[in-house]
Image: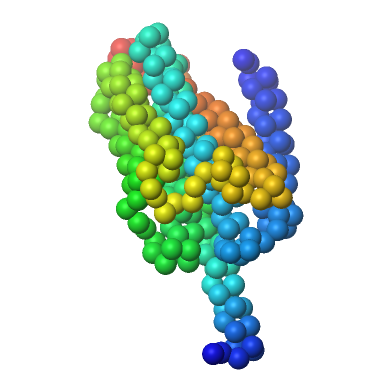
């Protein structure tokens, strides 16, 4: 049977381990959101450039 | 709605989202008590569950818009359906990643082929396929028609995901709000997180829909440029 300090140490290790998973899940959520927002932003930027370019081309004709 | 009105709605939504996110983080990490069995690991629940409900809401929205497209044959509905599906896939991706991160320390495995997990994976794959298939149909009307039918068929899996833990034996936690398994002190945090995810869904859907409208404008300008040659 492990003594009291050893049991306490194991409890702390277990807590740290679950905190790592919580941290990873939290980072994953923010990362997915950030990547998605960046993808929307870059697609929007490219399409706006396309609109300007096409309007310019049509205006010249 | 004109551009000024749209900007005003966006500002209000973003302000609500910012305040809501700060409140949700405070409630999920500081205000709610530590769960007695799982400890802090249970706090994954405050964004895993709202992300799952929001993903299903997005797919339900896609279903309604797909039906509306088949009735009205208006591309506006197709753009809205496509935007909802993409945002829904993003929320379901959060679910598919945070779930195994909770399962590993709780069940000692990353994944188990249980009804809830399997049906969720199928749902995610169906909507990823929905997004991919659209790229291979160049004709906009055919693409819209095919997507509407695909969206309606794919949604059949959503009720299976929702009811799987009620219909079959599963190691996935039971619906805690219905069974009363969630402590009353943890409920406000869950509701606030749910509300924040719904506001986030509306913000992303609006942004994605405007992007799709710009894409439509580009397609129209390209056609005009080609006929002008």
Q: How is the image coloured?
A: rainbow
Q: Where B93 falls versus B207 (above or below)?
A: below
Residue at image x 44%, y 37%?
Answer: B162
Question: B138 or B31, which is in the foreground?
Answer: B31
Relative horizontal placement of residue B80, taking residue B223 as reference (left or right): right
Q: Where B96 falls versus B138 (above or below)?
A: below
Place residue B138 in its image quadrant. Answer: top left
Question: B201 or B7, which is in the foreground?
Answer: B201
Residue B123 shows in the view: yes
Locate residue B147, reporting x and y percent.
32, 24
Place residue A13 in its image quadrant. Answer: bottom right
Relative horizontal placement of residue B228, taking residue B68 as reference (left or right): left
Locate residue A33, reporting x and y percent.
53, 46
Question: B67 or A3, which is in the foreground?
Answer: A3
Residue at image x 30%, y 18%?
Answer: B145
**Rendered-image quadrant of the C terminus of chain B:** top left
Q: Where B227 falls versus B118 (above or below)?
A: above
Locate residue B143, reporting x and y percent.
29, 22
**Rendered-image quadrant of the N terminus of chain B:** top right
Relative horizontal placement of residue B72, taking residue A35 as reference (left or right): left
Place residue B107 in its image quadrant. Answer: bottom left
Residue B208 shows in the view: no
Q: Where B93 falls versus B5 (above or below)?
A: below
How many numbered tags mark residues here? 0
Residue at image x 52%, y 58%?
Answer: A25
Residue at image x 55%, y 68%?
Answer: A18
């Amino acid at each position: 049977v492990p003594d009291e300090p050893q049991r306490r140490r194991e409890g702390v290790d277990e807590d740290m381990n679950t905190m790592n998973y919580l941290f990873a899940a939290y980072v994953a959520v923010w990362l997915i959101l950030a990547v998605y927002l960046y993808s929307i932003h870059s697609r929007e930027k490219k399409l706006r450039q396309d609109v300007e370019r096409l309007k310019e081309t049509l205006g010249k004709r | 709605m004109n551009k000024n009105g749209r900007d005003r709605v966006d500002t209000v939504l973003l302000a609500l989202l910012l305040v809501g996110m700060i409140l949700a983080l405070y409630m999920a990490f500081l205000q709610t008590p530590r769960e007695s069995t799982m400890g802090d690991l249970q706090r994954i629940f405050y964004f895993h569950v709202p992300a799952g409900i929001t993903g299903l809401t997005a797919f339900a929205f896609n279903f309604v818009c797909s039906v509306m497209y088949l009735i009205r044959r208006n591309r506006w509905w197709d753009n809205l359906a496509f935007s909802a599906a993409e945002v829904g896939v993003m929320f379901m991706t959060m679910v598919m990643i945070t779930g195994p991160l909770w399962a590993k320390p709780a069940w000692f495995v990353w994944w188990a082929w249980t009804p809830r997990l399997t049906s969720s994976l199928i749902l995610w794959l169906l909507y990823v396929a929905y997004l991919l298939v659209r790229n291979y149909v160049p004709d906009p009307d055919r693409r819209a028609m095919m997507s509407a039918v695909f969206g309606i068929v794919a949604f059949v899996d959503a009720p299976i995901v929702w009811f799987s833990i009620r219909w079959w034996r599963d190691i996935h936690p039971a619906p805690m709000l219905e069974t009363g398994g969630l402590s009353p002190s943890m409920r406000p945090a869950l509701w606030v997180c749910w509300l924040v995810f719904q506001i986030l869904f509306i913000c992303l859907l609006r942004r994605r829909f405007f992007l799709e409208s710009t894409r439509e404008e580009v397609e129209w300008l390209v056609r005009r440029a080609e006929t002008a040659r």
